[in-house]
Image (tube, rainbow, N blue to C red):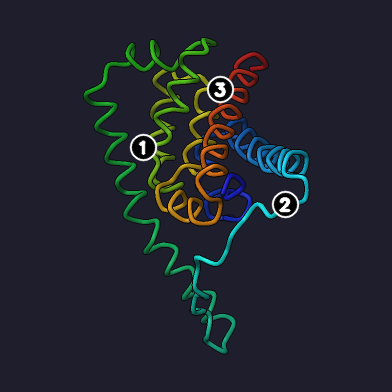
Amino acid sequence: MMCSILLNPQLIIYSTALGGTALTIRIVSCFFCGITAGILIRLFNRGKPFFRFDGFEEPKSRDTDPNPLLRLIKNIGRNIKTTGPYFLLGILLSALFQRYVPQDVMTRFFGGNEAFGVLMAATIGVPLYACGGGTIPLLQAWLMDGMSVGSAAAFMITGPSTKITNLGALKIVLGMKNFLLYLAFVMVFSCAVGLLVNLVI
């Protein structure tokens, strides 16, 4: 889940709207987040099974068309159908934010190099994130209004990692104890990345 952007080329394309720096930070931070999680599981789980897949049924494949080109077109259509409404919602929300939320509020909460701004961004990434494409217009507006790149990085990590549909599946796979450890790890890692980015940039 944390490396979902690396598995979704469409999200990488959307993220180019944030600029080269934010895109690079997003890809690199997700990559290292996944590696760090894997190392921690290896160190502390001591060979015990970490995941439980008995709560899932085998999904039916939708890729049944024998023609590869038609199969690709159908997949692109399904992706647009799934992410399109969220992307439009993100544009609407960013317009509302720009119209009704004063710029100094964004700068005060998310600007500068303060840890509070990074923590706030990581925290609002939990309930606000509905779809990767849908948050791009919001982040674009927030960055223009004074949000620090570190706060944006923290939001981009917690968002996909705590998307409500992802959390439902993770709770089944991980069990309660590992699920809570996962949430704690995501919050700590996102805040650490946000602070590091603010120090460097």
Characterize the local packing of mark 3: few (<14), some (14-19) or many (20 or more) Cα atoms within 10 angstroms.
many
Front residue of 151 and 169? 169
Q: Mark 1 — residue?
A: 127
Q: Mark 2 — residue?
A: 48
C-alpha span from label 2 to label 1: 32 Å
On the image, the x and y values in percent for residue 195 come to 60, 18
Up the image or down, 26 lies above or below 50; here it is above
Asked which secondary structure carries label 3, the reply is helix
3 vs 2, front mark: 2
On the image, the x and y values in percent for residue 180 come to 51, 38
Quarter of the picture holding the C terminus: top right
Characterize the local packing of mark 2: few (<14), some (14-19) or many (20 or more) Cα atoms within 10 angstroms.
few
On the image, the x and y values in percent for residue 166 come to 47, 51
Q: Which quadrant of the structure image shows residue 125?
A: top left
Characterize the local packing of mark 1: few (<14), some (14-19) or many (20 or more) Cα atoms within 10 angstroms.
few
2 vs 1, front mark: 2
> Is residue 183 rendered to the left or right of residue 32?
left
On the image, the x and y values in percent for residue 153 come to 55, 29
Query: Looking at the rendered structure, which numbered label has been put on residue 188?
Result: none
- Labels 3 and 1: the sequence-earlier one: 1
Asked which secondary structure carries label 2, the reply is loop
> Is residue 164 rendered to the left or right of residue 149?
left
Q: Mark 3 — residue?
A: 150
Amino acid under label 1?
Answer: Pro
Please report the residue visible at 53 percent of the width from the left and 28 percent of the height from the top: 154
Question: Could you tell me if the residues under marks 3 and 1 are in contact, i.e. CB atoms within 8 Å?
Answer: no
Q: Which quadrant of the structure image shows residue 79?
A: bottom left
